[in-house]
Image: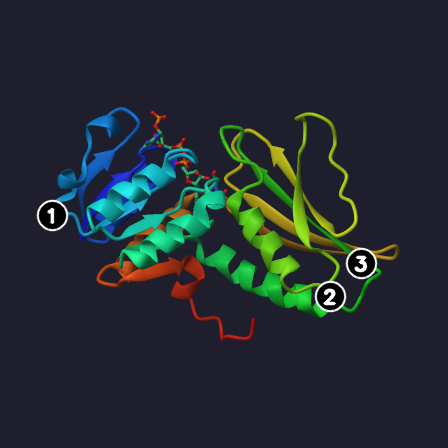
Amino acid sequence: MNIALLGYGKMGRLIEKFALQRGHHIHLIVDENNRPDISATDFEGVDVAIDFSQPEAAVANINLCFEANLPIVVGTTGWYDQLDDVKKRCLDGNKTLMYGSNFSIGVNVFFHINRLLAAVMNPYKQYDVQVEEIHHTQKLDAPSGTAITIAEGIIENTDSKAEWINNLIGEGDEIIPKGQQLLIESHRIDDVPGTHTVLYSSEVDQIEFKHTAHSRAGFALGAVVAAEWIAGKTGFYQVNEMFNFGGHI
Ligand SMILES: NC(=O)C1=CN([C@@H]2O[C@H](COP(=O)(O)OP(=O)(O)OC[C@H]3O[C@@H](n4cnc5c(N)ncnc54)[C@H](OP(=O)(O)O)[C@@H]3O)[C@@H](O)[C@H]2O)C=CC1
Ligand SMILES: O=C(O)C1=N[C@H](C(=O)O)C[C@H](O)C1
């Protein structure tokens, strides 16, 4: 496939490596520097675009791909407040988009089990649940997109939580959750690629469910596999649709 990379930072460069290993060709690279000069016609000959740019850049890049009728995989996080609008425009215009807060197999297994675990824990009201995420200090968004997906999986499968609230440790006053708020605690520590933990705590014990990324390789390879998966399809997809963990939740 001929791939356009939108964003050529830590992830874009690693995606290039895996794409080449899998026999693809990088046809076009769009970064902060050349973005103003790019128009839909520059995507001629491209089969699929992969966006790992920045929260405030993602929607403009999606629009460009819609204009060029180009399938796009969006790994960028921090733009999900515009998800409903993007979904509508994608479906109304018969375009193709897959987005995901995390493209690694391990985290997608984690998402699935997190939902099952929330349903299992739901009757046991003596446990309170919270989510913790740790990422490198260059990360622009908090909480992480992955932590939001985890929180949504819990909220959808438990009666005791209705919305999430974020506490970015070291930034401003401590945020204390109230009522049915689910706390996502965010930590920023030098080079951490991404660690997510779900904690169920009672007076007598604690259950910890944790995923630790050792590097960004799983995210990058997953994005290339996603690009292979959506090529030739039309529609609006979330990354979990690429996996089949047996249905249930
Ligand atoms: N879904 C997933 O599995 C994963 C998602 N992510 C997400 O991917 C995104 C990128 O992460 P990462 O590579 O670590 O970040 P980096 O900051 O290393 O790279 C982002 C790149 O995007 C460039 N950029 C800025 N504006 C634009 C634009 N308008 N069009 C194209 N490129 C632009 C930046 O250029 P410049 O530096 O010149 O500003 C930079 O090179 C983040 O939102 C992160 O949360 C990360 C890992 C996994
Ligand atoms: O910015 C990152 O680095 C990451 N971002 C994604 C997120 O926000 O969840 C995925 C991964 O955790 C790394």
Quarter of the image where one finds residue 242: bottom left
Q: Residues within 10 Å of mark 2 (few under 14, many from 20)?
A: some
| Comes first in the chain, label 1 or label 2 | 1
Mark 2 and mark 1 in contact (Cβ < 8 Å)? no
Q: Secondary structure at mark 2?
A: helix
The mark closer to the camera, 1 or 2, is 1
Residue sitting nearer the eye, 92 or 196: 92
Cα distance in 3D space between marks 1 and 3: 54 Å
- The image position of residue 108, as x and y in percent, is 49, 59
Cα distance in 3D space between marks 3 and 2: 8 Å
What's the amino acid at mark 2?
Met
State the mark number for residue 57: none
State the mark number for residue 127: 3
Q: Which residue bears the numbered disc 1?
A: 45
Q: Quadrant of the C terminus?
A: bottom right
Residue drawn 69% across the image and 25% down it: 172
Mark 2 and mark 3 in contact (Cβ < 8 Å)? yes
Q: Which residue bears the numbered disc 2?
A: 121
Q: Name above or below for residue 199 compared with residue 115.
A: above
Q: Residues within 10 Å of mark 1 (few under 14, many from 20)?
A: some
Residue sitting nearer the eye, 25 or 86: 86
| Comes first in the chain, label 3 or label 2 | 2
What's the amino acid at mark 1?
Gly
Residue drawn 46% across the image and 41% down it: 79
